[in-house]
Image: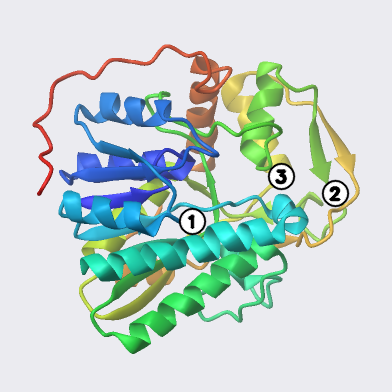
Amino acid sequence: MVLVTGAAGYIGSHVCIALLDAGLDVVAVDNLCNSSKASLERVQSICGRTLVFRHADIRNEDVIYDALRAYGVTAVVHLAGLKAVGDSNIRPMTYYENNVLGTMRLVSAMKRANVKSLVFSSSATVYGIPNYLPLDEKHPLGPTNPYGRTKLVIEEMLKDLCGSDDGWRIGNLRYFNPVGAHESGLVGEDPIGVPSNLLPFVAQVAIGRREKLQIWGNDYATPDGTGIRDFIHVVDLASGHLSALRHLIKPGVLTVNLGTGNGSSVLEVVRTFEAVSGRSVPYEVKERRAGDVAACFADPTFAMDALGWKSTRSLQQMCADHWRWQLQNPNGYHGSELPKVRERPRHLHRRA
């Protein structure tokens, strides 16, 4: 049994699909501050299996401990946390409280329940401004915003935890830029308010929810002047978590980049999306944002060596899958009819 925090979110819902499809049982925990329970209902429809849902906050240590004990959890995938870079500059203490304190409470509950296998959702933001490209796991760390600093604090905290107790097995996954959606079109990214990520904004312009895209700078030292990032399909990202769980066999922390190793510019994403959707995406160029870098993409070699994992989906497929999600869910999960579960799976029994 695997407990997934932040399970109803964009990445969490896809991770739950990967785990259920692999035959694992799942306890899904989410406080729903940034997500919808509807995503988990759709996860169960896609997989034809049920999961256990707990509406809870990871800062409530006793509730997490009860869930770990009640369902005989043996491993945790930790995805819960606030993640908007811009917002973290405005509300830094809120990010430290949710991300750092929340992880401390989660780890304390795990220790009490003697559950010492953990896959943690970190971020490529811990690298900061690249000294060289592609970014490998040995690159110096220097996040430039509070969100990235919370991730680095947690990484260091988990490293110290393993140093104090060799019973812990921790996978530390540094994400690059997750995009796309499940191929069914039932589960995808549903941002609250104005999207802070590129592809949801592009899709909302294409479908007519927003007038135009803002491109922040077109004078970078890149082929078309716009910033280059490593976009990874969320389904590939989810499979990386499953691979990490399967490779937590040695004590200590295993730190791995999850990226494609390929950089795509903002304009390349826009043009690819226009091609797969058949819609135009009007845009306007704005001045560069403070802290943005010209290019950032991963060296994924170690992920293949350590986990036997690599990304397989192209930028075209990322855009096509996101467009399918957007077309089927023009308003996200809000107001959409939920699909029915295809079959009744075996019952999950509580353990006394």
Mark nearer the N terminus (2 vs 1): 2
Mark nearer the N terminus (3 vs 2): 2
Is 101 placed left or right of 215 in the picture?
left
Residue 260, label in figure: 1
| Residue at 60% over, 34% down | 191
Location of mark 2 (residue): 218
| Residue at 26% over, 85% down | 166
Location of mark 3 (residue): 266
The kind of residue tagged 3 is Val
Mark nearer the N terminus (1 vs 3): 1
Please determine whether, in this image, residue 277 is positioned above or below residue 175.
Answer: above
The kind of residue tagged 1 is Thr
65 or 251: nearer the viewer: 65
Q: How far is the residue under mark 2 from the one under mark 1? A: 24 Å
Please determine whether, in this image, residue 335 is positioned above or below residue 186.
Answer: above
| Residue placed furthest toward the bottom | 164
Q: Circles 3 and 2: CB distance less than 8 Å?
A: no
Q: Circles 2 and 1: CB distance less than 8 Å?
A: no
Q: How far is the residue under mark 1 from the one under mark 3? A: 16 Å
| Residue at 68% over, 61% down | 93
Which secondary structure lies at badge 2? loop
257 or 77: nearer the viewer: 77
